[in-house]
Image (cartoon, grey):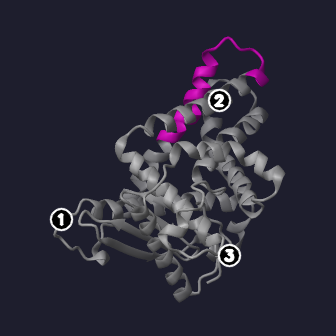
């Protein structure tokens, strides 16, 4: 498969998940130093229904599918990371989430994000003595972005998450090396940047920024409508943010695009840490597994995936 194949990924517990249009693969460093590897196919709704590949709609679908795959990958990685030394579990029996568990995790994750980063900024701003609608929307947006940065900065001090951030950087380095057509060996991949234009962290920032413009059209309605708008417009905002990230991924060398994307690239400094060669090795294996699965299935999709 050429280096133009669309791949993205996610850091998990002691490992990395890589995703292509038709498959996802997880590689985890076990306590005994060995590698546990799992690969699963993807049946994307956007691949089956052409209308779901329309702009904005495709972003909503991609976000939902990425969250579901992410939850499944985390469950798989947790089952291997917790294995006692000396045990050798079968990768095909790796822990998988049921539909009910996925739905529960989805509700909790989205509920937390909406409450903290959408509803609470509106509540806080509404308590301030602000009478101008424009000022209200701008202050709300500033609070929203500040909460995001503060949250990412705070969790970066958690020791276990710092290791996840190292794997996050390893994932970015591997994808950058792959997209550049470089040899996928740890020493070579380690020389590449730990920042990637299609990163989910940058996506989050764009969600916050685009929300300012979308909510400007809503104005400052009464209390029930204010809260409802922050919740119900989230899919639209996510779809628009996806289009920005997608465009940036297709034009990474354009100076204007690069300038616009710079804040998102800077924010990745909070969610990435320089990885070790062992961690890069894990990321490379996950990428090789998903590329092999893609070659075997011959899958094709117009759905972009985030790094």
Q: Quadrant of residue 99?
A: bottom left
Q: Residues at badges 2 and 3 in contact (C-beta under 8 Å)?
A: no
> Percent position (x, y) of residue 176?
61, 65
The answer to which of marks 2 and 3 sits earlier in the sequence is 3
Q: Residue at x 70, y 39 (%)?
A: 209
Residue 287 belongs to magenta span:
no
Q: Nearer the viewer, residue 83 or 165?
A: 165
Mark 2 → mark 1, Cα distance in angstroms: 53 Å
Mark 3 → mark 1, Cα distance in angstroms: 39 Å
Q: Which residue is mark 2?
A: 226
Q: Nearer the viewer, residue 229 or 8?
A: 8
How many other residues sit within 10 Å of disc 3, few (<14), some (14-19) or many (≥20)?
few
Q: Which residues are magenta?
A: 112-135
Task: State which quarter of the image contains the N terminus.
Answer: bottom right
How many other residues sit within 10 Å of disc 1, few (<14), some (14-19) or many (≥20)?
few
The answer to which of marks 2 and 1 sits earlier in the sequence is 1
> Percent position (x, y) of residue 154?
46, 34
Q: Residue at x 60, y 68 (%)?
A: 177
Q: Quadrant of residue 79?
A: bottom left
Q: Is residue 92 left or right of residue 62?
A: left
Q: Which residue is mark 1?
A: 85
Chief SS of the magenta region: helix
Q: Residue at x 58, y 48 (%)?
A: 201
């Amino acid at each position: 498969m050429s280096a133009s194949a669309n791949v993205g990924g996610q850091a998990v517990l002691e490992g990395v998940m890589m995703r292509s249009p038709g498959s996802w693969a997880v590689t985890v460093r076990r306590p005994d130093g060995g590698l546990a590897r799992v690969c699963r196919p993807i049946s994307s709704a956007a691949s089956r229904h052409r209308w779901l590949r329309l702009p904005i709609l495709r972003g909503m679908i991609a976000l939902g599918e990425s969250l579901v795959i992410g939850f499944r990958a985390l469950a798989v990685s947790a089952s291997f990371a917790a294995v006692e030394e000396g045990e050798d579990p079968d990768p095909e029996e790796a822990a998988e989430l049921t539909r009910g568990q996925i739905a529960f995790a989805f509700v909790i994750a989205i509920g937390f994000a909406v409450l903290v980063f959408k509803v609470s900024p509106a509540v806080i701003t509404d308590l301030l003595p602000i009478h101008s609608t424009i000022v209200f929307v701008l202050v709300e947006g500033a609070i929203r972005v500040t909460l995001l940065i503060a949250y990412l900065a705070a969790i970066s001090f958690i020791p276990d998450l710092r290791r996840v951030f190292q794997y996050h950087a390893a994932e970015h380095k591997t994808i950058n090396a792959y997209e550049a057509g470089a040899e996928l060996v740890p020493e070579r991949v380690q020389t590449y940047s730990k920042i990637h234009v299609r990163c989910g962290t940058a996506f989050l920032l764009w969600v916050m920024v685009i929300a300012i413009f979308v909510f400007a059209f809503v104005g400052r309605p009464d209390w029930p409508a204010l809260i409802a708008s922050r919740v119900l417009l989230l899919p639209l905002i996510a779809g628009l943010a996806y289009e920005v990230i997608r465009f940036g991924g297709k034009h990474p060398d354009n100076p204007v695009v690069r300038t616009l994307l710079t804040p998102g690239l800077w924010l990745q400094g909070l969610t990435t840490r320089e990885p070790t060669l062992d961690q890069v090795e894990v990321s490379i294996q996950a990428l090789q597994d998903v590329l092999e699965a893609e070659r075997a299935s011959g899958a094709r999709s117009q759905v972009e995936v985030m790094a």
